[in-house]
Image (spheres, helix red, strand yellow):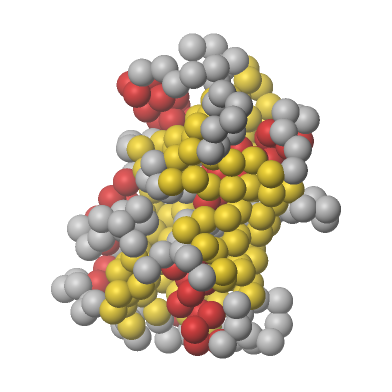
Amino acid sequence: MRIRIVDAFTDRPFSGNPAGVLLLDSFPEDDWLRKVAAEVNLSETAFAHPLPPGGEADWALRWFTPTTEVDMCGHATLATAHVLHSTGIATGTVRFAARCGILIATAEPDGTITLDFPTSSLTPVPAPDGLEKALGAKPVAVHDTAAHIGDLVVELADETTVRTLAPDFALLSTLSDRGIIATAVADEPEGAYQFVSRGFFPAVGIDEDPVTGSAHTALAPYWSARFGRDELTGFQGGARTGVVRTRLRGERTHLNGHAVTVIDGELHA
């Protein structure tokens, strides 16, 4: 069967966030899906199969890290939509049925894809014991996110602090259900992007995720409230980086970006 590696939230290879994508006729047993994801060994591998016409969704979609299945993943959804559109399997809008509900991906005239995801709630919480030590930086504010995400959004002092983090991943893995999203206002918010972030997910087998689409369903309302604007651009990453354009639409958040296929091959399993 065909397996593709797609770099998401970037318009050039070897940047953004890579995801494995497999289009199937149906989902095999979970153990096989886990083994394939472990073999691919990227932050997420997406598995999708077509659904009968006339329903609320066109494709069923699941995502696995190298160690576990997750409820929501933005970059692997973007990667899957990119494969469907770039191969001509789908045009226009594609609806995915996932554990977190119905997700929508729309191909735009400029070659980007816009994802329509549920907006995450944000609940202020005290900083967990050990968070400052684990990050190596003092939190300005900490917020918990919705159940399907399960991250802590941690605002830090400035862009430089976020970019230079060198976390203690073993300690960080004990502090959140899924991960820690470190974020700060951009040094030049009137420029190409208004906020920066990095995503750390050692609890699910990923020390750092380069560009985390699902986290932006929380970052969008967080920073939109601060800037008083519904449309913002976020820059995420450490060694690999990417850009997510966000548009807040009440209970839904739109995430827009490019994707590029880097590897297209065969899985012998």
In the depicted view, which residue is nearer to us: 230 or 162?
A: 230
Determine which quarter of the picture holds residue 239: bottom right
Q: Is residue 239 above or below residue 196?
A: above
Query: Which residue is found at the position 71% from the left and 76% from the top?
Result: 192
Where is residue 225? Give x, y as percent.
49, 84
Q: Farthest residue toward the left?
A: 129
Decide if residue 41 is in sight here. no
In the depicted view, which residue is nearer to us: 199 or 137?
A: 199
Q: Farthest residue toward the top?
A: 268
Q: Is residue 62 above or below residue 102?
A: above
In the depicted view, which residue is nearer to us: 258 or 27?
A: 27
Query: Which residue is found at the position 35% from the left and 86% from the top?
Result: 140
Q: Is residue 262 above or below residue 265?
A: below
Q: Is residue 23 above or below residue 6?
A: above
Decide if residue 223 is in sight here. yes
Determine which quarter of the picture holds residue 232: bottom right
Where is residue 172? Give x, y as percent.
27, 61
Q: Can you say which quadrant of the picture contains the N terminus?
A: top right
Where is residue 43? Give x, y as percent.
46, 44
Query: Which residue is found at the position 72% from the left and 33% from the top?
Result: 90
Query: Which residue is found at the position 20% from the left and 58% from the top?
Result: 174
Left or right? Give the position of 201 relative to 113: left
Where is residue 191? Give x, y as percent.
71, 82
